[in-house]
Image (cartoon, rainbow, N blue to C red):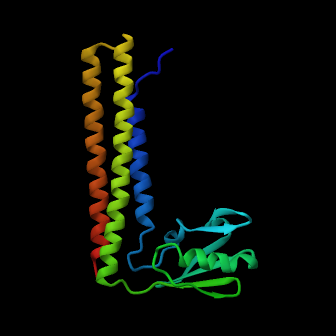
Amino acid sequence: MAEAFSLPALKDRMQKSIASLREELAGLRTGRASASLLEPVTVEAYGSRMPLNQVATVTVPESRMLSVQVWDRTLAGAVEKAIRNSGLGLNPAAEGQVIRVPLPELNEERRRELTKVAHNYAEQARVAVRHIRRDGMDLLKKLEKDGDLSQDESRKQGDLVQQATDAAVSDIDKVLAVKEQEIMQV
């Protein structure tokens, strides 16, 4: 049996791409400490790479400080190294099982770097949405070729897929603009 075309399923996949972008952007530092800042960090632990939240607890004791409580004392060095090498521009300091991560003041150059990172995330989301569009269009072509869908219906559905894609890309641009504004505020 041929695979059925579902516009709502495609729209749902596009919305998931936008939600993923929002999560990635939430991890970008804007000058305030946030536990989500360290979510992308992975630690070399027990012979494999693990997300930081599986080996430690991240808390925010002050507005410009993160505190990482490592559960296994032997991993403290690995966690400190992972945070330092994460590309987030952080300089952690270990004190036994607790690692303090002060957040430096954002200067203009760092703000521009963060904006570039945000643009990268947005472009990845746009590419994901375009891949979803391509999947939908390919399915429509296949259904039309197999005779399960008329040429007119295929074209009509294709236009709807394109409209959904345009709406999703527009949403991505809006999310990016809000984050860019947040980063560039002093």
Quadrant in the rendering for residue 4: top left
**Where's the C terminus, which quadrant?**
bottom left
Whether residue 176 can be seen here? yes
Q: Residue at x 41, y 39 (%)?
A: 12
Residue 144, position as x, y percentages in the image: 34, 16
On screen, residue 112 above or below 12: below
Q: How many marks?
A: 0
Residue 171 horizontal side relative to residue 55, left or right: left
Residue 22, percent across and down? 40, 58
User: In the figure, is residue 155 to the left or right of 82?
Assistant: left
- Residue 14's spot in the image, x, y percent? 38, 43
Q: Nearer the viewer, residue 91 or 9?
A: 91
- Is residue 65 placed above or below 51 in the rendered structure? below
Residue 140 left/right relative to 66: left
Q: Residue at (39%, 25%) from the top-left corner?
A: 139
Residue 154 x %, y %: 29, 20
**Quadrant housing residue 80:** bottom right
Residue name at image x 64 percent, y 73 percent: 57
* Residue at horizontal 39 percent and vertical 35 percent from the top: 10
Instruction: Tell me, yes or no, if residue 148 can be seen here.
Output: no
Q: Is residue 58 above or below residue 139?
A: below
Which residue reaches farthest top? 147
